[in-house]
Structures are given as structure tokens and as C-alpha cells.
Amino acid sequence: MSQSKPRHAPLPDFGVDGDRLLVGGIPVDRLADRVGMTPFYAYDRRLLGDRVGELRAALPQEVKLHYAVKANPMPAVVQHMAGLVDGFDVASGGELKTVLDTTMPTGEISFAGPGKSRDEIGRAVAAGIVINAESEAEIRAVADIGAAQGVTAKVAVRVNPDFELKTAGMQMSGGPKPFGIDAERMPQVLSSMAGLPIEFVGFHIFSGSQNLRAEAILEAQEKTIELAGDLASHAPAPVKTLNIGGGLGIPYFPGETRLDLTVVGRNLANLMPRAQSLMPGVEIVIELGRFLVGEAGVYVCRVVDRKESRGQVFLVTDGGLHHHLAASGNFGQVIRKNYPVAIGTRMRAPAEESVNVVGPLCTPLDVLSQKVDLPRADVGDLVVVFASGAYGLTASPTAFLGHPAPGEVLV
Amino acid sequence: MSQSKPRHAPLPDFGVDGDRLLVGGIPVDRLADRVGMTPFYAYDRRLLGDRVGELRAALPQEVKLHYAVKANPMPAVVQHMAGLVDGFDVASGGELKTVLDTTMPTGEISFAGPGKSRDEIGRAVAAGIVINAESEAEIRAVADIGAAQGVTAKVAVRVNPDFELKTAGMQMSGGPKPFGIDAERMPQVLSSMAGLPIEFVGFHIFSGSQNLRAEAILEAQEKTIELAGDLASHAPAPVKTLNIGGGLGIPYFPGETRLDLTVVGRNLANLMPRAQSLMPGVEIVIELGRFLVGEAGVYVCRVVDRKESRGQVFLVTDGGLHHHLAASGNFGQVIRKNYPVAIGTRMRAPAEESVNVVGPLCTPLDVLSQKVDLPRADVGDLVVVFASGAYGLTASPTAFLGHPAPGEVLV
């Protein structure tokens, strides 16, 4: 309980009613009764809207905001986002089906990802969405399939730039990569596209994700626009759309601070005239997943046993790694750190003990929070893991050890 | 292609027919046609039997061999194992259902794992299986539920020993742990059990898993038997069963060498008289998961694109992290290393290029093998990932990015 420990950044305001956390305005224990089970994921509709509002306020009005469905493909969330954002990006045929069931205009939907199957390409072409082609073979496949269907397929080319997004949680560009076509090969590829029966619509240049440093994002955005401008001169048609990716991070761990959106927005505004001079009429798209939905979601599980072992307290819950791999620290993380957690049924009580929150799996990997200071909790209390709205349920091995899948609600 | 690189240990002999790997005696491309899709997992019935045979030959005849279903809960595999091993250990109500559908006698089934729900305990008590109790609260819950059902529940107590399994891939004991009851508290707990309406059957002492060093296993087994012998004097009834866990590892990565089973078996044989003198009539159970099934399984995916980027070759396949998280290096591993892989349709061709085998996910984590020397492969070829029979499909986030689930067959 030392004050010198690094702390989590302040969370979005879910609200509290007495001792209980509110999610979607509903006390979390009542929400558990309504879901009819624990554990469950819950996403707060109001917070989704708030986040989009913050972005709209910070970004230049002419920048289009797309939602990268992979971050949270729950159909109800996607339906809700359809009313908030300007477009969707999907990463598979499965996600394509989900977005086609919304009112989003098909021209505002794009499909990126290496190794698209012919079946996926066929469905995308038939739907009339934009295919972000990841390789020369894929460009040819799209052209062939479009010709067979009698449809002129819309193609953007994904480019692997020769720079990287510095300090990104994940590097998606620079050096040899499976994503897109190397920038230096692009002039030749673009020339070869001129003869194909496709509609060239622009570029997709995505250099990394989960970045909390505004200056790194600014640098990547500037380089992205310059690169697209260079390539535009080789393109078979004017660049209508430039998807500059996302990369905006959210704070997960103690000591991380929130990204300054104002700085990102101001920089983008400054880049707009340059983009228009290089690519007249171009529409700039920013594509965000985690940043839109990550902090609007919680994972809720119930304490089923309280144990002490050699001086440490273990809250054994009915939730764990099988539902929330990222919070357990086992999804591509080198050093395990704690997500923000609370006892959702003891919000007014002071932190009075250091505990380990674990799950029911027979593996030492099944830890939701390690040595975290919390109010005293007993069997029946609800543990809430925050920052769980993105890459939570679908990024977890739900069949692991044969436990039931969690509930999932949008409230 | 340097000869000085560390190499993978020799694999079990799947067999080869011409250029094709055999799995269950079937050429892998024909098997893909039979499954009707790629990717798929395939487990080789003959290799499962061979592994059990090796163990039976090495271990003392009186040691009972249990299968820890969590390693691979595919119902067909579990049905097959029912005819090969002496008992099952399950980790959830889901796994309990699977084993109760086999011919395994219920007295030879045990259920371990922290935080068992009342529903799970109720089903286990009704089935008449042995419950490995993980806490004092759980012992009381079992007694209560048994009384309510009019059934005398069979209880073994899981002990958190005061020693660890050195060099284990996963430490399950020593220090503060959520598993079992600390050894030093056991005398008191055992005394308190005397008055409860349950049948005490023995102990479960599991100190770690995935160990390739025989001497560490020997040391843990010896300490386990001594600890159980000490605790036996406090027990409310004679110790009928002592589950000493498993811990036997399999080689996954370059430079790892196979565990010497002969040494493990000889040591166990030497310990048997001591175990009988401490606990007359005791039955020693060794519980193995990964060691029984891990090397009998392969994951097979198809090359859907072949790309070069800045001097590196990428084989983009239809399989990846979403089906096989462990092979991607993202399941609790600190440093990513390659599982053994082959081009299953080019088994006779020499390794002639260094390639990266990646999946269709839009994340740099989606790598099945990095800079591995393989025969030249093209679109349509099948990539085989070996050592995939344990903690493969069920330990993977199959819903990630909305791609189809893989097939799964026992052949």
C-alpha cells in the first residue's frame, strides 16, 4: 500500500452506487443476476459514445473514423458502432458477415489481412467492399474473381513502409513483414495494376498499434502521408482513400499515462493541406480498434474460494486465463503486469490487503492480478477487471480445461 | 543451414510415403481431403499406444498410469485412452462429462483444480469419483454436498509441498500457491477431517510439469513419497492412493533432449518398498498429460500465399496463432522458439531456404515458425507442426479475428 508504487492511470467514469460499481448504469451485482451467470464481459454503451465524441472533438472534421472490428466483434457492439463511426475494417470472412448485417454502407467497409482465402475474396468482391490487398498474388486473385463475378472490385493496396512506428506495442511495419507490399516494390506493382479490371481506390499504411507516445504517432502519420504522396504518382488512378491505420494506445499497466489526443489531432490538422496537395481530393481514414472499445469494457468474475498460503492471500474466482488471456499476462507479453482491477461490490471500502486474484485452472499461469492492494473480499464478491473491452473474449482460449464460456453483454 | 545450429530432438516415427508425411498411416494430403478442410489437428492412434507401451516398460508394474485429460480432451482421444491407461484426472465439469462417457471405472477418476463450483462438486460426488480437494473450504463443501445427496464422497487432499520441482517448465509447488493446502497445515486439516462424513482416500502432490531432467524428477518423487509418508500418520484413514503428479516433459525446441525414462522408472522402482513401508497397501499413481499425447499430434495447415519482403520469404498459411497459440510462442513463453515443422508434401526434398511460416491474422504475433530451413514450398503445400497433440486446440483463442475453427481427427 506504499504510495510510491506506480499507479494505474485514472479510469473512465463508470459510476458507483453505494458500494457497487455501475456498468451501463446498472449495479454490477444486479447486472450479474441479469446476465444469469458469472463470469461475464460487459461493455458500456455510454462510454463507447463518449470515446468517439472525444475523438471527433480532437481530430480534424474531414478525417474519417473507422472501427477495426477485430478489437471486439460482438455483434451488438458492432451494430452500436455502426451508428457512431464512418466505416469498418474487417480481418476475416467471419467479421465481414457481422458488419454486412449492419447499416454501414459497403463502400465504407474494408478488408485487410494476409492470406485471404478465395472464398473470403469472393464474398468481399460480391459485397462491394474495399479489399486491402496484401500481396501481388492477392491483387491478381481479386481481379480474377471480380472478372468471374462480373464485378469491378475495389482495391486498396496495403503498403509495408520502410519506417516503423517507434515505441509501438506492436510493430506492423519496417523491415521484412508479412503485411502488405514493400514500399520500394510499389511503383512497379502500381504500374502493373493499370491493366487489371479493378478499381484502384488508394492505400492502407498501418505501422503499429498500442502506442502511448504522441510524438511517435505524429512522426509515423507524417511519414505515411509523404509515402502515400510519393506512391500516388505511380498509381493507376487518383488516390481516393488513404487509410493511415491507428496506433493510438490506451493505458493498461501501472505507470502508463494517457495519450494526449489534442496533440495528435492538431498534428493531423496541420498535415491535411499537405495531404490534399499531394493527393487532391483524398479522404484520410484513421482506423481504430482498441482505442475505441478497450476502456469501455469490464470482465466480471466471482470469488469462489478465499485461501491463504504461506503468508499470501488468494482470491480464487470462477474467471481466469481461459476467458481473459491478456489480463493473465500470457498473450505475447514478456513481463506480467496487472490490469486495473477492483472489488466491484466493495467500491467504498479502503484497500486493506495485498492479494492474488487467480482462476480455477490447474496452471500457475492462471492469474488475473498479482499482489494487488484491494479491499477485503470474501466468497461471493465480484472482481472487476477494467480495460477489458478489446482483445478480451475473442483473444482467449475459451475451451481450455473445459470450463463454461463467459457471458457477454452490451449495456 | 549451418550444422552448428541447435537441432530438434528426433521425432516419433510417423512414417513417410514418397514425398508425403504419413499420419495414422495416411498420406497427409489425402488426410486433408478426408478431413475436408485445412487447417486441422490429427492425432496418431498408433503413437499414443506406443508411448503408453514405452511407459509401461519403463515404470514399475505396480505404478498406476493416469491420463490428465486437460492435455487433450478430444472425446475420441479420451475414449481411446480409456483402453490404454488405468485412470483419468479431470480439471472441470466439462472434462468430467467426457470421461464419464467412457468405460473407465469411476473409482479410477479424480477431479483436481482450485475453485470448483458447487455444481461441479455435486456432479463429481454423484458420479462417485475421487475429489482432489484444494482447500479446507472445499473439503467442507464436499462433505455437505455428499450428506445432502446421501453419498459418502471420496476425497483425496491436494498438498502444496514445501519443495519445488527444479527446472520444471511450470512450478506448481513450493512457496505460496493457489493449489492444494500447505504441507505444514496438513496435520491440523487431516485431524479435522476425521469427523466428516467423507471417505479419505489419500493425497495428490503435484510439483510441476514439462521437465526434461530426470534427476529433478527423481528428487521430487522421492520428496513426495517422504512427505506423504509423514502426513499419513495424521490421516483419518490409511492412504489408499498417492497421486505423485507427472512432470515428465517432451522436447519442443531446438537443443532440447529427450527425458531418459529408464532412469525415472528405475528410481520409482527403488522407491516402491519405502512407499509401502510408510503407507502399507498404498497405490502409487503417476498422472501424465502432455507426455502421453503431445508428440502423437500434428497441426496441418496449407500455404495460401508465398511472399518475399526485404530479403525474407514468408509462407502465409491458413493456420496460425488462433488455432495453435503455443506454437506461435505466445502462451506463457518468454522467448519465442520454433516447434519442429516440416513441409508435409515435400518430405524427401532437401532444406533449401530459410522461411517464416505465418498465419492469416493481422498481427505480428501470428508466426508459426521463424527463419526455419525448409524445402521450397509453394501455394497448396501443407505445413506440418509437430509436437501438437497437447495444449494445442483447446489452449488457443479460436474465435480470434473470426476465422473458422480447425478440423480435429484421431487416426
Image (cartoon, coloured by chain):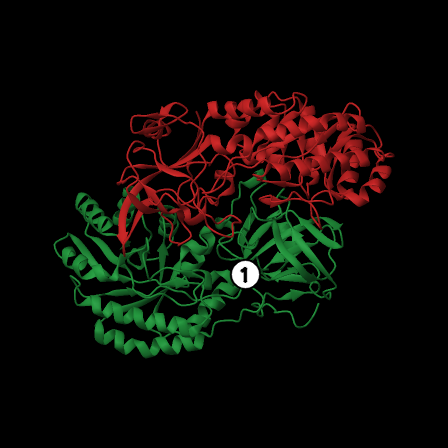
Chain colours: A red, B green
Amino acid carrying mark 1 in the image:
Ala
Q: Is residue A171 above or below residue B183?
A: above
Question: Residue B40 location, x and y as percent?
Answer: 58, 50
**Quadrant of the rendered structure where residue A130 is?**
top right
Q: Residue furthest front?
A: A4
Q: Is residue B57 visible?
A: no
**Quadrant of the rendered structure where residue A206 is?**
top right
- Packing grade of label 1 (10 A; few <14, some 14-19, many >=20) is many
**Quadrant of the rendered structure where residue B200 is?**
bottom left
Chain where mark 1 sits: B
Question: Residue A306 location, x and y as percent?
Answer: 27, 46
User: Label 1, on which residue?
Assistant: B387
The image quadrant where one finds the C terminus of chain B is bottom right
Front residue of A200/B272: it is: A200
> Left or right: A45 with respect to A348?
right
Front residue of A216/A150: it is: A216
Q: Residue furthest left?
A: B195
The image quadrant where one finds the N terminus of chain B is bottom right
Question: Residue B258 location, x and y as percent?
Answer: 51, 71
Residue under the point 48% across and 72% down: B259
Q: Secondary structure at mark 1?
A: loop
